[in-house]
Amino acid sequence: MRKPTRPREQGRGERVLPGVWRLRLPLDLPGVPHVNAWALQASGGLVLVDTGMHDRGTMGHLEQALERIGHRVSDIQLIVITHAHIDHCGQAPPLAKRAGCEVWMHPNWKLHAHDDLDKTIEIALLSGVPAQPLERWAEARRGMGSGQAGTLYSDKDLVPGVTFETDAGTWNVVETLGHAPSHVCLHQPEQRVLLSGDHLMGRVSQYFDVGYTPDPVGEFLDSLTVIERLDARLALAGHARPFTDVQAHIDANRREVEARVSATRAALADGPKSAYEAARAVYGEAFNAAMASWLITLTRAWLVHLQQLGEVLNDGGDPVEHWELAS
Ligand SMILES: [Zn+2]
Ligand SMILES: [Zn+2]
């Protein structure tokens, strides 16, 4: 007798513009059901932007999505990565090997591509996460794969000035640090299309890698100004349907930053707090076991931003860091 199986979603491919396809790949992350890779036709072959995460069955999803648009892995002539998060770069090494093509990525990928569980636990302890939930979380994480196939590498630095050709036109690299220190957007000026990765998401769902650059939130705000000047009419984001109201998304992101930074300031009004305590105050009921890691990292980003603005001090505490308003 066959065991009942949960119907698993498959990789899909859909045309967005002539020569531009969205490859929608299922993801197994809390609150993030899909990641997009983008296939750009280029003289008979493809440039692939992002690859999806590596997990059981994920290469099959990508192959299936490619098949839906009439292509295969061997058609890929170049792999371009928007940023070195596993849901975007996780399958790059084996794909590049099979296709015999290069991988291009921003040089800052080296800063954060090799983070391990020990480092995450160290930061969690510094943030004041209680030992019990931290142990449970670490145990669950140990049971998961890394999301990265093979060893990540880049053949060429993806920095401003670098371009690549496709049938839809030439794409420029726009450096957009903030979400990750290795983040770039890709811009096609004639068609006014922006491949926005996780810099501009379809919904306002922010995240910042903390600890690699001085002020990820400040860098993110600067990067919003950079893409605003491009005046794109279509954004192709990492985890959403293509959207045209690009300016509205930029404005919504600015408002979200402002609201969270204010809430963080308010959370410190009654005295010093650890990042864990501040996160509970800022996010209230949204702070639960599944979201804690994400929300503590976000809160650290707001705190670091306020520190850079001179509004908040960090006691450099050992073992738990506390943050307080500068008087
Ligand atoms: Zn990301
Ligand atoms: Zn992502």
Image (cartoon, helix red, strand yellow):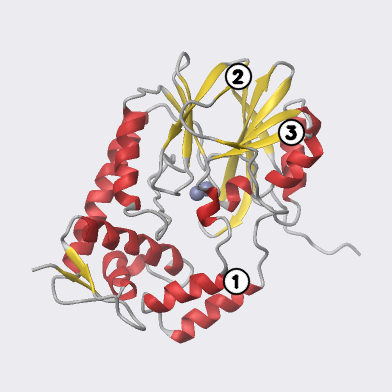
Q: Which residue is drawn at 75% across and 41% down?
A: 95
Q: Position of residue 32 (x, y in %)?
A: 53, 52
How many other residues sit within 10 Å of disc 2, few (<14), some (14-19) or many (≥20)?
some
Mark 2 and mark 3 in contact? Answer it, CB < 8 Å: no
How many other residues sit within 10 Å of disc 3, few (<14), some (14-19) or many (≥20)?
some
Inspect the image, locate mark 1, and give the three-letter code of the amino acid beneath it.
Answer: Arg
Which image quadrant is residue 136 in?
bottom right
The residue labelled by disc 1 is: 141
The residue labelled by disc 2 is: 165
Q: Position of residue 154 (x, y in %)?
A: 63, 42
The residue labelled by disc 3 is: 101
In whole angstroms, how far apart are the C-alphas of marks 2 and 3?
A: 15 Å
Q: Residue at x 53, y 82 (%)?
A: 135
User: Any atom of ligand 2 within 8 Å of the CB at mark 3?
Assistant: no
Which numbered disc, 2 or 1, marks the residue that appears first in the sequence? 1
Looking at the rendered structure, the secondary structure element under dot 2 is strand
Q: What label sits on residue 187 in the rendered view?
A: none
Which image quadrant is residue 163 in?
top right
In whole angstroms, how far apart are the C-alphas of marks 2 and 1?
A: 40 Å
Whether residue 196 is visible here, answered yes or no, is no
Q: Position of residue 273 (x, y in %)?
A: 24, 76
